[in-house]
Image (cartoon, rainbow, N blue to C red):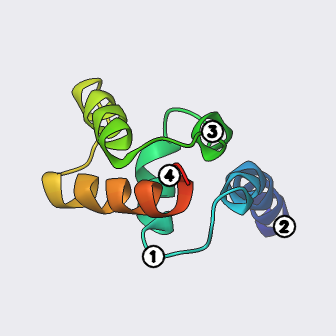
Amino acid sequence: MMRAAAMALALAAGPAMAQEANLPDKPGKKLLVQVCTRCHPADTFAELRLTREEWRAEVDGMIARGARANRAQARRIVDYLAANLGRK
């Protein structure tokens, strides 16, 4: 029984870990994964290159649609996205 539970946990973690691999391992990544990948895979935004203002609008829009993040968390997510997935 324990073995089956461990296998189920490993299989469930696999896609999340794969999603995280597409994102730079920098401060804010864990929060971004926790908040943003509840509804969609990281692949949907990992390749985007938006300005800070565009990322802020995206994050605000997701919060308006039900993403669970307070203002401080939203700022940290925008900071991560702008620094690591921003336009160069």
Q: Position of residue 33 (x, y in %)?
A: 51, 55
- Which residue does the numbered mark 3 point to in the structure image? 41
Q: Position of residue 46 (x, y in %)?
A: 63, 46
75 with respect to 55 (left or right)? left
Image disc number at residue 86: 4
- Nearest-to-viewer mark from 2 and 4: 4
- Nearest-to-viewer mark from 3 and 4: 4
Mark pair 2, 4: CA separation: 43 Å
Q: Which of the 4 image quadrants contains residue 53?
A: top left
Which amino acid type is marked by label 2? Arg
33 or 82, which lies in front? 82
- Nearest-to-viewer mark from 2 and 1: 1
- Nearest-to-viewer mark from 1 and 4: 4
Disc 3 residue crowd, few under 14, some 14–19, many 20+, Cα 10 Å: some
Which sits earlier in the primary sequence, circle 2 or circle 4? Answer: 2
- Which residue does the numbered mark 1 point to in the structure image? 27
Instruction: Please say if 10 is above or below 59.
Output: below
Image disc number at residue 3: 2
65 or 13, which lies in front? 65
